[in-house]
Image: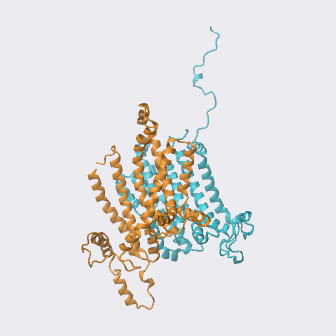
């Protein structure tokens, strides 16, 4: 198992390098000019100097190499400095945003908690709703509950978050006035009353994201339970007189969870992508919204870093899913 | 004893009734498909919507771009049922927007764009996915590298990359193909290029199993070339997984196009699509909720229909489930 994990970790390095190259080339091929916003009165030779100051005058492979060094070598050093108070990264060039002229990573670190709160909570809520639905609708296959569950999961698949978002805002903020329509990230939780406000403003974005998660995971849970319920060991368990609850909740559930857990791990990067839209609807200033504003402002270092962070998430969780599968299911041998 | 009727030795072998016409595979598929109510409704709704957006402009001959500023901000005709003071007009059954453009005509035009993007992107993704899947399943040499490549593309962050590609390549394509044509090529291209991987994997798996079967061996033994083995023998056998992933691809393409329009990187502002109509109305949805709900409902119902259709097709095309 350990050798497999190490082999996968080593294999993920070329994957990440390929992805970074794709993103880099895409941005290089793009015709956007960071000097487009500079006033026309600035003489061309000054513009050329500014261009060089941004590191644009050099050949592509030099730019790519410098970006790799900055991202994989200097930024981790900054992180270590921050944690242990050392001075490894002193005086070294970091990835600088063209919009704010400050290090990209600093802004990303400011924005990540908001995204993690909303996305993480919604994922947990979604899973907590999905698992019981999946278990029960598999246990009572073709019952009214199962049919209704299938219908609701189909709806969850089909209604895009940019429709459920405004719909919920119309119903709960405009018509009923129960929940705020905008997520206030400056809000600080200090006591019970402020916690209640925080809770209220998180309900809608979390539910919009959770609907998608629920639809997917309850489908997987149902089919995985159905696969196991027909197996011989279930009949054996019933034949030796175990209670129905023990049979379903222990014997069947544990075996059915194996594929579902990997699906849960694989879904985490996708939900970050979905958060781009949800953050836009509810005005959460997380990394999805940061990516959008950076795109419109032609801030290439920021866009590149953010896209690459999404890519790292995907590769990382693919790896976690693979390893988890091997750990949980003793029948699977990778070597 | 001798006057009993002579026994006809072949009686048992003769048919009692005239032989039935042989059942074709597609008849079986249709019989199974009929039993799936959701799939029937879904398929029906998809056909209805496709026809409606195709024929609609001839039935409802209002120019979606025509400004009628005197009749702006009309409510749909049905709001008059509960609100007698609402501004309604029979000439605009679903109301008008803040510039007086007819909403029904806009929905039809928007549906045309959304469905065109959906179908085109789906076909593109299917072509790439099937080609990659067949080549890597059939030719052992190409398999390793093509599948590694597929894995790599699968781990690309799709939505951020779509956003990046659409924002950055908008200008040159617009300059070459005009504002609408350029965006159409760009959006169809990026959606198609980023959604072929699942099809490729499924097709490859099926081809790997099929090419070991006897009929392929027989075909090869009479000297059939690889190209015609693929075209004549392999592709017809993998048509069912391709059809199922086609429905999934159509649903994803429609949603992705609407999401791009919603985020403001889609088609130009005077070119309606369902996602764009929805996004433009979010600002004033407190006064005019129907402008958000109508396009949103159309997107959701279409995608729901396509998903149900895919569900039914999967059941109908699987010979192990069929007949139950």
* Residue A159 image offset from top left, x and y in percent: 55, 59
Picture colour for chain A: orange
The N terminus of chain B sits in image quarter: top right
At a point 38% along the width and 77% down the height, the residue shown is: A97
Q: Is residue A213 positioned above or below A53 on the image?
A: above
* Residue B26 image offset from top left, x and y in percent: 57, 45
Q: Nearer the viewer, residue A106 or A268?
A: A106
* Residue A62 image offset from top left, x and y in percent: 30, 75
The C terminus of chain B sits in image quarter: top right
Residue farthest toward the top in the current orientation of the protein? B1
* Residue A255 image offset from top left, x and y in percent: 40, 43
Relative placement, left or right, of A138 versus A255 is: right
Q: Is residue B179 positioned above or below A157 on the image?
A: below
> Within the image, what quadrant is residue B258 found in?
bottom right
At a point 39% along the width and 71% down the height, the residue shown is: A110
Relative placement, left or right, of B62 versus A55 is: right
Residue B231 seen in the current view: no
> Within the image, what quadrant is residue A77 found in?
bottom left
Residue A112 seen in the current view: yes
Q: Is residue B227 positioned above or below A97 on the image?
A: above
Q: Nearer the viewer, residue A198 or B251?
A: A198
Give the total number of marks visible in the rendering: 0
What is the basis of the colouring in this image?
A: by chain
Q: Nearer the viewer, residue B220 or A12?
A: A12
Q: Which chain is cyan?
A: B
């Amino acid at each position: 198992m350990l050798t497999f994990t190490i082999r996968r970790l080593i294999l993920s390095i070329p994957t990440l390098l390929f992805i970074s190259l794709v993103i880099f080339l895409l941005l290089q091929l793009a015709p956007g000019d960071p000097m487009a916003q500079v006033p026309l009165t600035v003489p061309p030779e000054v513009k050329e100097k500014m261009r060089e100051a941004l590191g644009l005058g050099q050949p592509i492979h030099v730019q790519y190499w410098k970006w790799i060094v900055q991202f994989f070598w200097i930024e981790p050093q900054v992180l270590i400095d921050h944690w242990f108070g050392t001075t490894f990264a002193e005086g070294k060039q970091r990835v600088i945003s063209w919009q704010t002229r400050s290090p990209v990573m600093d802004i990303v670190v400011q924005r990540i908690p908001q995204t993690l709160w909303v996305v993480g909570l919604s994922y947990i809520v979604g899973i907590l709703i999905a698992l019981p639905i999946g278990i029960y609708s598999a246990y009572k296959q073709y019952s009214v509950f199962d049919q209704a569950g299938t219908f609701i999961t189909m709806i969850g698949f089909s209604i895009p978050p940019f429709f459920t978002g405004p719909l919920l805002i119309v119903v709960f903020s405009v018509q009923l006035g129960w929940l705020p329509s905008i997520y206030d990230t400056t809000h600080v939780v200090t006591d019970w009353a402020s916690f209640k406000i925080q809770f209220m403003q998180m309900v809608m974005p979390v539910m919009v994201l959770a609907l998608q998660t629920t639809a997917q995971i309850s489908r997987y849970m149902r089919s995985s339970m159905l696969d196991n319920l027909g197996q011989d060991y279930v009949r054996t368990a019933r034949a030796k007189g175990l209670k129905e609850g023990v049979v379903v909740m222990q014997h069947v559930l544990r075996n059915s969870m194996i594929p579902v857990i990997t699906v849960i791990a694989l879904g985490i990067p996708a939900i970050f992508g979905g958060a781009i839209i949800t953050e836009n609807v509810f005005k959460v200033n997380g990394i999805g919204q940061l990516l959008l504003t950076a795109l419109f402002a032609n801030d290439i270092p920021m866009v590149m870093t953010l896209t690459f962070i999404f890519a790292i998430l995907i590769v990382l969780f693919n790896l976690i899913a693979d390893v988890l599968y091997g750990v949980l299911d003793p029948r699977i041998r990778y070597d | 004893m001798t006057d009993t009727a002579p026994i006809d030795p072949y009686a048992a072998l003769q048919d009692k009734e005239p032989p039935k016409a042989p059942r074709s595979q597609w008849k079986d598929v249709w019989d199974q498909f009929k039993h799936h109510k959701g799939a029937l409704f879904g398929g029906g709704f998809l056909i209805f919507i496709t026809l409606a957006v195709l024929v609609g402009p001839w039935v409802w001959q209002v120019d979606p771009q025509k400004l009628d500023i005197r009749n702006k901000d009309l409510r749909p005709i049905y709001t008059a049922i509960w609100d007698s003071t609402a501004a309604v007009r029979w000439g605009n059954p679903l109301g008008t927007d803040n510039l007086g453009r007819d909403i029904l005509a806009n929905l039809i035009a928007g549906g045309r764009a959304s469905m065109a993007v959906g179908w085109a992107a789906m076909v593109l993704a299917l072509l790439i996915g099937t080609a990659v899947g067949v080549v890597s399943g059939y030719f052992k040499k190409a398999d390793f590298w093509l599948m590694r490549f597929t894995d790599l593309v699968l781990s690309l962050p799709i939505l951020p990359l779509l956003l990046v590609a659409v924002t950055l390549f908008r200008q040159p394509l617009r300059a070459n193909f005009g504002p609408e044509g350029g965006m159409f090529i760009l959006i169809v291209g990026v959606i198609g290029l980023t959604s072929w991987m699942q099809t490729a994997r499924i097709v490859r798996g099926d081809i790997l199993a099929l090419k070991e079967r006897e009929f392929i061996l027989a075909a090869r033994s009479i000297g059939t070339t690889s190209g015609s083995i693929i075209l004549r023998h392999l592709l017809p056998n993998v048509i069912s997984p391709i059809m199922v992933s086609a429905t999934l691809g159509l649903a994803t393409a429609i949603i992705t196009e609407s999401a791009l329009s919603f985020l403001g990187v889609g088609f130009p502002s005077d070119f309606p699509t369902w996602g764009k109509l929805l996004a433009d109305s979010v600002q004033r949805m407190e006064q005019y909720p129907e402008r958000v709900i109508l396009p949103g409902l159309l997107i959701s119902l279409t995608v729901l229909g396509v998903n149900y259709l895919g569900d039914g097709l999967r059941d109908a095309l699987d010979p192990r489930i069929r007949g139950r």
